[in-house]
Image (cartoon, helix red, strand yellow):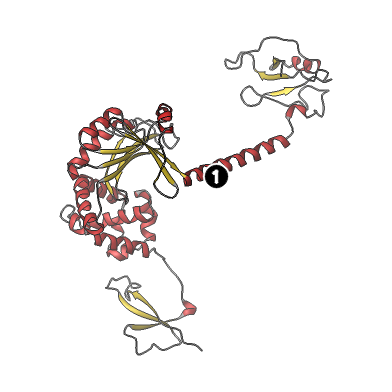
């Protein structure tokens, strides 16, 4: 029988009895084999036939979050600002639980309380109980951390500069929104409002979230704004915020075309800042002739540009070969779907060309239609006029949204419908 190596792991011997002690490194062996005497760690025999997995918890991700927290030195920042309460609540552990959830499995505080905390190893890693995941405790922890937002960004900026040599000369600024399925009215000062929905949910209230990050992805500042905030009104406040936090410098701002206005760009130039902003499509037609005369300059293997200097700006026309190929493939996929759908519709029989089974009795075999859902074109019974098709709708007399159509002569096949008292059928159009 070939010998198998021991499986080292961290085991807490008192975990089954409910008491807590420091975990130590041990080696696990099948119970029918003796532990190797040369091992430094203690050996424990395991009965494999009775081995079962109970209460599994996510360990690796939670351990990585705790290591990242210690590497950033966040304990030194939060301990003097959020000490433990008189009842013994460790707000530092509450923040660690919230941060781990946002990084590993973003969800609401209610779900953290009901599900996620029990499936994670945060209690084992922090040495705390389930009291740190109480619903009200999580909400209060967020309320206590919010006043220290500006100080936290300043602390993180110093840590990122020391650890990763991060630079804050180039900043990316963008807006997003998140909606809520709740109905107004809301308390005074609530930021949930109806506005332009990027999620295509204009029926829901929302808030607008503005974020400034570095090209490496380090967040510099963020702000939660009312849901009806216009994009073009947010940049000026962020210019003041960034200058207050990080001082004045000749930074380069990268923004979407809908965020800045001409007045905002003029103010940005007066402050000594620079920017790269998308040009509205309406202005490209005015610059088309001037750009056509400029030569192409190769920047990368698949990227080339044209430069058009202006009085205060430089227009840069960029062409990416990879982007051209991507957009062509997107159009091909869309075209294939449309052609497949057209082929399906072409093979589908038309309703007004299907012969009714029984035309002797009114209402039998005739396709039914309503004003808003289906408009079915029917030909006459003899089909003598091949180019004339009668477009018919049914309506209820007196309904405000279904007024009676003008009276016109009906084909003989439709005369039996006049006998029905609650419905009339009229011809809306006799031409194809």
Q: Could you tell me if residue 84 is visible in this image?
A: no
Q: Which residue is mark 1?
A: 329
User: In which quarter of the view is residue 221 placed?
Assistant: top left
For the C terminus, the image quarter is top right
Q: Nearer the viewer, residue 205 or 185?
A: 205
Residue 94 spot, x, y in % from top left: 27, 55
Residue 364 spot, x, y in % from top left: 78, 26
Q: Residue furthest left?
A: 80
Residue 166 spot, x, y in % from top left: 25, 53
Q: Nearer the viewer, residue 295 or 327?
A: 295
Callout 1 environment at 10 Å: few (<14), some (14 to 19), or many (20+)?
few
Compared across the picture, whether 325 is left or right of 85 comes to right
Q: Nearer the viewer, residue 83 or 431?
A: 431
Compared across the picture, whether 225 is left or right of 412 comes to left
Secondary structure of the residue carrying numbered label 1: helix
Is 152 above or below relative to 22? above
């Amino acid at each position: 029988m070939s010998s198998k190596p021991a499986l080292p792991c961290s085991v807490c011997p008192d975990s089954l009895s409910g008491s807590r002690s420091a975990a130590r490194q041990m080696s696990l062996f099948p119970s029918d084999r003796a532990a190797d005497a040369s091992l430094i760690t203690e050996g424990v025999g395991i009965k494999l036939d009775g081995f079962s997995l109970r209460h599994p918890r996510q360990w690796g991700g939670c351990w990585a979050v705790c290591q990242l927290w210690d590497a950033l030195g966040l304990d030194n920042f939060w301990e003097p600002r959020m000490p433990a309460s008189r009842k013994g609540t460790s707000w530092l552990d509450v923040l660690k639980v919230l941060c781990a959830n946002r990084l590993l499995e973003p969800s609401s505080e209610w779900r953290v309380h009901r599900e996620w905390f029990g499936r994670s190893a945060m209690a084992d890693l922090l040495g705390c109980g389930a009291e740190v995941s109480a619903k009200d405790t999580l909400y209060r922890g967020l309320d206590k951390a919010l006043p220290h937002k500006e100080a936290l960004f300043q602390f993180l900026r110093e840590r990122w500069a020391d650890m990763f040599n991060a630079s804050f000369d180039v900043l990316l600024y963008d807006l997003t929104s998140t909606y809520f399925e709740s109905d107004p009215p809301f308390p005074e000062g609530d930021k949930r409002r109806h506005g332009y929905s990027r999620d295509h949910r204009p029926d829901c209230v929302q808030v607008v979230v503005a974020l400034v990050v570095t090209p490496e992805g380090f967040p510099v500042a963020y702000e939660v704004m009312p849901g009806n905030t216009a994009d073009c009104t947010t940049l000026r406040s962020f210019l003041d915020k960034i200058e207050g936090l990080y001082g004045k410098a000749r930074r380069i701002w990268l923004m979407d075309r809908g965020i800045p206005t001409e007045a905002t760009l003029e103010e940005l130039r007066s402050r000594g800042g620079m920017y790269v902003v998308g040009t509205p499509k309406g202005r490209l037609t005015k610059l088309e002739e001037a750009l056509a005369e400029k030569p192409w300059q190769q920047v990368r293997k698949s990227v080339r540009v044209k430069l058009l200097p202006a009085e205060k700006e430089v227009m840069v026309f960029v062409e990416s070969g990879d982007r051209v190929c991507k957009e062509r493939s997107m159009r091909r996929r869309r075209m294939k779907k449309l052609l497949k759908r057209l082929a399906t519709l072409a093979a589908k029989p038309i309703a007004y060309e299907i012969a009714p089974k029984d035309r002797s009795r009114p209402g039998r075999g005739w396709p039914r239609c309503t004003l808003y859902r289906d408009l079915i074109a029917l030909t006459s019974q003899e089909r003598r006029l091949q180019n004339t098709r009668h477009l018919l709708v049914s309506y209820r007399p007196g309904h405000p949204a279904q007024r009676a159509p003008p009276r016109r002569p009906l084909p003989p096949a439709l005369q039996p419908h006049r006998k029905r008292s609650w419905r009339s059928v009229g011809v809306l159009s006799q031409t194809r």
